[in-house]
Amino acid sequence: MARTGRRPGEGNTRALVLEAARALFAEQGYDGASMRAIAARASVDPALIHHYFGTKQDLFVESLGLPLDPAVLLPGILEIDRAELPDALAELFFQVWEDEGARERMLSLVRSISTNEQAARMMREFVTSRFLFPIADHLGLPDARLRASLIAAQVVGLAVMRFIVRVEPLVSTPREQLKPMLTAAVRAHLTPS
Amino acid sequence: MARTGRRPGEGNTRALVLEAARALFAEQGYDGASMRAIAARASVDPALIHHYFGTKQDLFVESLGLPLDPAVLLPGILEIDRAELPDALAELFFQVWEDEGARERMLSLVRSISTNEQAARMMREFVTSRFLFPIADHLGLPDARLRASLIAAQVVGLAVMRFIVRVEPLVSTPREQLKPMLTAAVRAHLTPS
């Protein structure tokens, strides 16, 4: 362990909790795994988990090494005007995917989701309940959740094609040229016909 | 082998060629693997491969068990008006993904592409050179190949979110409601701002 200001034994407890959290989120999904059950699996007091990690959402983000924390991002996004939202979401996409460390973690997540139903289930539950639906419900549009999930599909597909399948000309097109096209696609999904 | 009208030994030759084709496409990509090299690997006469399988494209489709043959689809697509193309592509998407056998083969392809760079490379080369770029070049739009690849990203992302990650409400929304929204998204990509 790296030297920190933690008490002796804290590092070990944290590691046990993170391992128990990863196992239970995989087995029972994000919604199904309770903090109490994670504490029991790690043989620690539930209060200790809250003390070290905060909420279940915080623990999920930390145990999976997610590069984004919806709890941090969401309040800012919910303040954005609907007219400005397409540009803001496109900007967020490039911030995450063009940061090398974040991209590597996203790629490893995509791989586990596409090959492992347990991983797919826990990410699906987490992303929809903590990110997609709160944004959708805030929009006040007909079919808002469906529209939000189609936007997510566009964004996921762009990541897959640019960074995993590496289809040209998507790979070599600079961010400045791609961003307005992604913004336009998001805007189309937010515009009822 | 199933009983067919084939000569004795033909089944074995076909199996050898398909195995050699899968290996060489994986090692050298779609563009890099030549029919001559596949014949050499299978220790058969190149003329025999053409006789049994047709073109390199036919051999690729058969060796990978692809549910779609671009050589069959493309001529029809290239006859469609640009104004009608979004609806036709959305219709094609649902035809493939709502057929159970085709969907299973597509899912298995997505899994190998997302975890295996060789699989990603050969599918990328094949799909772009035989399907995406011919359609794009036919459109006569500015940035047509970029637009075509963004449409592909939307379609791939929708397949991932509806059939792999299984995000609601995408899973339970009936085709009739989803299709016009996919059509609108494709149309937006084909409309220069």
Image: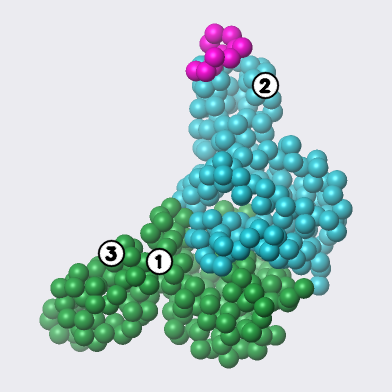
Chain colours: A green, B cyan
Q: Earlier in the sequence, mark 3 or mark 1?
A: 3
Label 2 and label 3: CA atoms lie apart by 52 Å
Residue nearest the viewer, comparing A82 with A92: A82
- Residue placed furthest toward the bottom: A79
Q: Is residue B3 rendered magenta in the image?
A: yes
Which residue appears at 69% of the width and 60% of the height? Answer: B176
Amino acid identity at mark 1: Met
Instruction: Residue B11 in the image: state x and y as whole percent.
Output: 54, 16
For the residues bearing labels 3 and 1, Cβ distance under 8 angstroms: no
Q: Quadrant of residue A43?
A: bottom left
Instruction: Residue A161 in the image: state x and y as whole percent.
Output: 60, 58
How packed mark 2 is, by other alpha carbons closer than 10 Å (few <14, some 14-19, many 20 or more), is: some
How packed mark 3 is, by other alpha carbons closer than 10 Å (few <14, some 14-19, many 20 or more), is: some
Answer left or right for A39 relative to B136. Answer: left
Q: State which chain disc 1 sits on.
A: A
Q: Is residue A166 rendered magenta in the image?
A: no
> Which numbered disc, 2 or 1, marks the residue closer to the eye?
1
Mark 1 residue element: helix
Q: Quadrant of residue A159?
A: bottom right
- Residue B50, which numbered label? 2
Q: In the image, which residues are magenta?
A: B1-11
Q: Which residue is mark 3?
A: A23
Q: Which residue is mark 1?
A: A122
Answer left or right for B29 relative to B176. Answer: left
Label 3 and label 1: CA atoms lie apart by 11 Å
Residue nearest the viewer, comparing B13 with A133: A133
